[in-house]
Amino acid sequence: MIVIKEAKTKKELKDFVKFSFELYKDCPYWVPPIINDELENFDVTKNPVFKHADAKFYLAYHDGKTVGKIAVIINWQEVKLQEKSKVRFGWFDFIDDIEVSKALLEKVYELGREHNLEYAEGPMGFSNLDKVGALSYGFDEVGTAITWYNYPYYIEHFEKLGFVKEKEYLESIFPFENVKPKFFKKVTEIVKKRYQVKPLNFKTTKEVMPYVDKMFDLFNSSYENLSSFVAVSDVQKEYFKKKYIGLINPEYIKFVEDKDGKLIAFSIVMPSFAEGLLKAKGKLFPFGFLHLMKAKNHSKDVVFYLIGVDPEYKSKGVTAIIFDEYHKTFSQKNIRNCIRTPELEDNTAIQNLWKHFDPVVYKRRRTYRKDL
């Protein structure tokens, strides 16, 4: 018999996080999170997303052994402001037993119906800055710090339980040697002159900080028309600023501003932390922190995390300036591979940015939907 219990205490939430470590202990492709970071993410007193979202965390047991977990989420901004009658679910892991996945998903339906919501969708996090999607292709590729991994049987469970594909995401990769300056050098100079815009580069995190709020505002305006978008709130800006900006190499943050000092484009790239996280095994101490710092300073793979352009400047070649600046930085650091985080399959505008670099789609992931 499968028993489902809500995880409420610190110990139970720690068990919730650590179940994935047990499930994937023999999998070389799963990249573990830092346990304390996950616990902070789930803490209603620390993560500002809970000002406009509710979440419940459940563990599944069989004969006293943990066999699965799920987070059930209602983002009230999404429900009330965007009128999307949706209950989310994420952090969904389970053994290959259809009774386990079925029992966990029943908790999703239960909360959704309790609030008169119309459908469930997942896997997805609290907001657009969280991980998203179940891996459907690329199971033999190492994950990244900002994506979930799952075994192939997850897809079979969704389909057997009546879920249908809602959104498709693509992840691509290309070697840095594919980046030929001829594709953007000339455009860069034309755009700079025609629109009187200029790039901003940074050497220290302190230099970046005054621009971060503007960056999130631009992020909101850049992506507001996408079907899955939920805006980043002011309190979330402060949280992400304090927690994450310091982890990113300042030279990997590129901005473009116009002649009046208005931010019109941005991009954030991170070194690949995958190898460091694999060695850290979920803990910063005693040596995990050193592994992450080594990855930050020496990784030859980079992950393009976010990129955004003011709607007024889209299709005007502004991204050529960003690529030009990255080419200079990556050449100095002898970067080897450029990795793209999940992009919506129907977001052709963003995909067109990379076409000259001959990217290869090496992973696909999906969210699944079920009407309640």
Image (cartoon, rainbow, N blue to C red):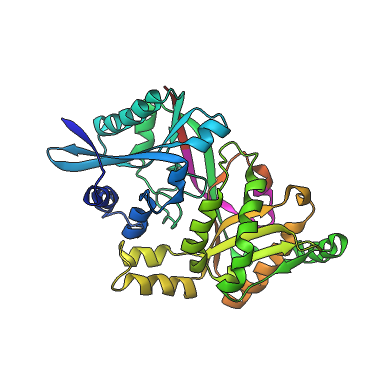
Q: Quadrant of residue 152?
A: top left
Q: Is residue 130 visible?
A: yes
Q: Quadrant of residue 2?
A: top left
Q: Given the current orientation, which residue lies at the most extreme right position?
A: 194
Q: Is residue 218 magenta?
A: no
Q: Quadrant of the C terminus?
A: top left
Which one is in front, 166 or 247?
247
Q: Is residue 143 above or below residue 371?
A: below
Q: Quadrant of the N terminus?
A: top left
Query: Residue 138: x and y, percent?
Result: 44, 48
The reply, left or right, for residue 3 in relation to residue 220 is left
Which one is in front, 241 or 94?
241
Query: Residue 27: x and y, percent?
Result: 31, 54
Residue at x-position 44% and y-position 64%: 273
Residue at x-position 48% and y-position 31%: 165
Query: Residue 68: x and y, percent?
Result: 26, 40
Q: Is residue 278 above or below residue 141?
A: below
Q: Is residue 330 visible?
A: no
The reply, left or right, for residue 188 in relation to residue 303 is right
Which one is in front, 118 or 239?
239
Query: Residue 346: x and y, percent?
Result: 62, 38
Q: Given the current orientation, which residue lies at the most extreme left position?
A: 63
Boundaries of the magenta span: 350-366
Q: Is residue 353 magenta?
A: yes
